[in-house]
Image (tube, coloured by chain):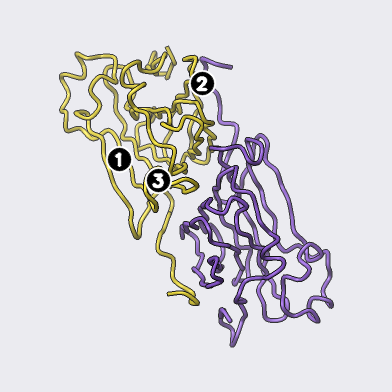
Chain colours: A yellow, B purple
Amino acid sequence: MKNKILLPKLFFTKDVLTGQNITKSSRKLKDLKGIFKDQEAFDTMDKETLVYDVSSHLPVKEDTPGGLYFGVTYIHPGKIGNEYFMTKGHFHAQIDRAEYYWGIQGEGILILMDEDRNVWGEKMLPGSLHYIPGRIAHRVANVSNQILSFGACWPSDAGHNYKEIAENGFAKRLLEINGIPNLI
Amino acid sequence: MKNKILLPKLFFTKDVLTGQNITKSSRKLKDLKGIFKDQEAFDTMDKETLVYDVSSHLPVKEDTPGGLYFGVTYIHPGKIGNEYFMTKGHFHAQIDRAEYYWGIQGEGILILMDEDRNVWGEKMLPGSLHYIPGRIAHRVANVSNQILSFGACWPSDAGHNYKEIAENGFAKRLLEINGIPNLI
């Protein structure tokens, strides 16, 4: 294998990640209990509804210092009541670890929260690039009528602290009010 | 600023990085003395010839643990004798730090070398994704007749050890032989 010119083993074309060692995962409504506000609307929906998929390239073991991971997330369009389909959201377990997100297709809002629970958002569009510093919780909501896809690159020792968000949520919710997304 | 939905501050469209805090740098032939084999051919060329440009988003200070950087490199087409225009190449100063490269436009070869000086290459094409593990020196050569552009994401505490490559080079060179790139 060494001393040769090899073909690439991985491809990242538009918003599709293919090749060696791509891991796929998906989150259905049944995996997202308790994150949406409107429990009544949630209860009426099919729990097998797909909310988002992730394709990831994870070339080293989780927690490896100095390594990187690369992924694409696809959030389906939809709402629970007036709250947009969104990712679970997390701080990093190693809280100082940063992450890049970049919008590829569709339109969304990157929802950010610092450790003092201040919340703000950044519009995610095809071609937008977002630096998420360490110590900032992050989740993404799809506010369009099509799949929202975005790329991500993050350190292999970042980890995910989903617990904090599962227990205390974000301090604001992204709700559709008069057809417009608002952080309330 | 907090509690609001902001417009994105950065854009990464096709192979162009624009917005807040984008740093640009360029390497001309005069900055690349000694890296090409054919000194005679080098001497005849205009030292102001642009070999490559880099646009980078460097949101935190170099050496910040946990931070990330994002960049796009544009290597112009050209040769010194039969050796393709290429980047200087480096190990990371924190040698275990990884990096992702992904081809956007043009065609190149990512040249990789481990600490035992084994050298190999990976073709870089529009849509190819390359994981460069820690402890692997890396440089890119443009083997096409157009600008080769590629994206990169790397840790802010990776640093660059250019010295090792400046002093000892890579153990092989990428030369055009009968119109085809060969690692010799």
Structural crowding at the residue carrying mark 3, measured as other residues with C-alpha within 10 Å and reported as few (<14), some (14–19) or many (≥20): many
Q: Residue at x 34, y 60 (%)?
A: A20
Which amino acid lies under the numbered mark 2 shown in the image of this protein? Ile
B129 lies left or right of A52: right
SS label for mark 1: strand
The answer to which quarter of the image holds residue B6 is top right
Structural crowding at the residue carrying mark 2, measured as other residues with C-alpha within 10 Å and reported as few (<14), some (14–19) or many (≥20): many
Which amino acid lies under the numbered mark 3 shown in the image of this protein? Gly
A157 lies left or right of B141: left
Q: Which residue is drawn at 49% across and 23% down?
A: A121
Residues flagged by tags 1 and 2 on a common chain: no
Q: Mark 3 lies on which chain?
A: A
B103 lies left or right of A146: right
Single out the mark in the foreground, 1 or 2.
1
Residue B45 versus residue B67 in the image, above or below: below
Name, please, the residue furthest toward the top. Answer: A184
SS label for mark 3: strand
Pick the front one: A71 or B106: A71
Name the residue beneath numbered marker 3: A71
Real-space CA distance between mark 1 and mark 2, rounded to the nearest whole angstrom: 25 Å
Pick the front one: B60 or A88: B60
Name the residue beneath numbered marker 2: B5
Name the residue beneath numbered marker 1: A53
Residue B50 versus residue A95 in the image, above or below: below
Q: Which quadrant of the figure contains the C terminus of chain B?
A: bottom right
